[in-house]
Structures are given as structure tokens and as C-alpha cells.
Amino acid sequence: MDTTTVLWGVKEGDEDWRETVLCTQPERFEAVKAMATRDGWGRFRVATINLTKPPDFTKAVSMSACECGSPKAPGESKCRGCAIGGFPR
């Protein structure tokens, strides 16, 4: 088995990064989605994962640098240190 197919979902009110694996049996995806919907889950997606290659997490994480050179979170204008007035030296 070189690939697996996964049904992912997000609990209502959670952010997208809190995706959870709901099922790995494609023949049950529709039934699981129906049950999960009743239990407050949504934003479903199906992904086929190639198990013969290591994952490339650089596509999942995006970091940029603050003016001081430290990493900052996406959407933030400064790193945590600069946001609180800088780290003591």
C-alpha cells in the first residue's frame, strides 16, 4: 500500500489548523461526514497521502522575518520580542 486516503474535518468554532483525521476508510467517508456534521464538525476535505515519500512541511508552515531578523508569525508585523519592547540584552 503506497497511498492512503484521509477524511479531515474541523470542529465548529475551531480554526482551520485544528484539523482532525476523522476516517481513513473511503467507503465510510459519507457516513462519517453525516455523523460528524450532526456532532458539530465541518470544513471536510479528503487528501491522498503518498506513504513512500516523506512529507514536505515547508508547504504547511510559512514564516517571515521581523526587522530584527527573528521569525514572526504570518500576519504579524513584529516578532514576539519586538512586540513586547524587545528582549533584554
Image (cartoon, rainbow, N blue to C red):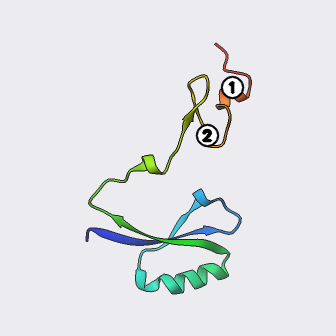
Give the residue at x 52% y 71%.
45
Q: Is residue 18 above or below residue 3?
A: above
Q: Residue 60 carries which label?
A: none
- The residues bearing labels 2 and 1 have C-alpha atoms spaced at a distance of 12 Å
Q: Name the residue under label 2.
A: 73
SS label for mark 1: helix
- Image position, residue 88 (x, y; %): 67, 16
User: Quarter-wise, where is residue 51 in the image?
Assistant: bottom left
SS label for mark 2: loop
Give the residue at x 66% y 82%.
38
Dot 1 surroundings within 10 Å: few (below 14), some, or many (20 or more)?
A: some
Q: What residue type is labelled 2?
A: Ala
- Image position, residue 8 (x, y; %): 51, 69
Q: Mark 1 points at which residue?
A: 82
Horizontal arrangement in the rendering, residue 15 relative to residue 49 (left or right): right
Dot 2 surroundings within 10 Å: few (below 14), some, or many (20 or more)?
A: some
Q: Earlier in the sequence, mark 2 or mark 1?
A: 2
Q: Is residue 73 above or below residue 46?
A: above
